[in-house]
Amino acid sequence: MTRKITIMALVAGIVLGGAATEGFNVYRQSHESRIFQERVHCKAVADAYVKENTDLNDNSATGWSVTLDKVDYSPARNSCVAELETTLWGTRNALTNTSVRDLLSGETLFSAGDTGDCSSLQPELVDPAFDYIMNNASIPIEVEKKWALTESSWRKACGSISNAPALQPRSAPPSER
C-alpha cells in the first residue's frame, strides 16, 4: 500500500514538474515575442524620426542631419530609447550633438555637445548613458552629476574648457586663475 502511494506521489511530482516547466516556457516565449514586437516598432519609430528630422537643403551643404546610432525597447521605461547624432551643417563647418532620447515622449534624456578635437571620447559619455537609461526608468541626480563631472574633466583634457578645474560641472561658470 505504501509502495503504491510512493509511486503515485512520484508520478504526480513528475507531472506537476513537467506542467510547471511547460507553463514557464509558454510564458517566456510570449514575453520574448512581445519584446521582439516592441523592438520592431521602436526601429520603425526611429527611422521615421530620422526621416522627419533630417533637413538638408538642395545643395546638401547646409541643414540638419540626424543619424541613428542605436535604438531599442526599454522595458523599464516602457518606451523606445534611441542614441542619435544630430549634425548642423553650415557652409564652412559642422556642429555635432549626440543625445539619448525617448522617442515616444520626445524627452531628451542625455546630451553631449560638439567636442571639437575630442570626438573620439564622446562614446565614453553617451554609451554608458544609453545603457543606464535602457535599464532604469528614471535618472537619479547622482548619475547626472557623475556625467557632468566626467564631461567636464574630459573637455578639460581636450582643451575645450581651458580654465575649468578637472571636476567642475559644465553648468558651473569658468574659474578665474
Image: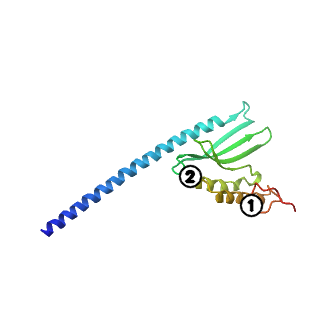
Q: Residue furthest bottom?
A: 2
**According to the image, label 2 marks what residue?**
137
Residue 7 location, x and y as percent? 18, 65
Tell me the kind of residue under disc 2. Answer: Ala
Image location of residue 146, percent across then percent down: 68, 60
Residue 97 image point, x, y percent: 70, 47
If the image is split into quadrants, where does the C terminus sit? bottom right
Residue positioned most to the right: 177
Residue pictured at 44% horizontal, 45% vertical: 34
Classify residue 10 as left or right of residue 81: left
Q: What SS does tag 2 mark?
A: loop
Between 174 and 37, the residue placed more toward the observer is 174
Q: Residue at x 76, y 51 (%)?
A: 116
Which residue shows up at 40% across the image and 52% down it? 28
Question: Between tags 1 and 2, which lies in front?
Answer: 2
Q: Where does label 1 land, which residue? A: 153
Give, as a three-letter code, the residue at label 1.
Ser
How many numbered discs?
2
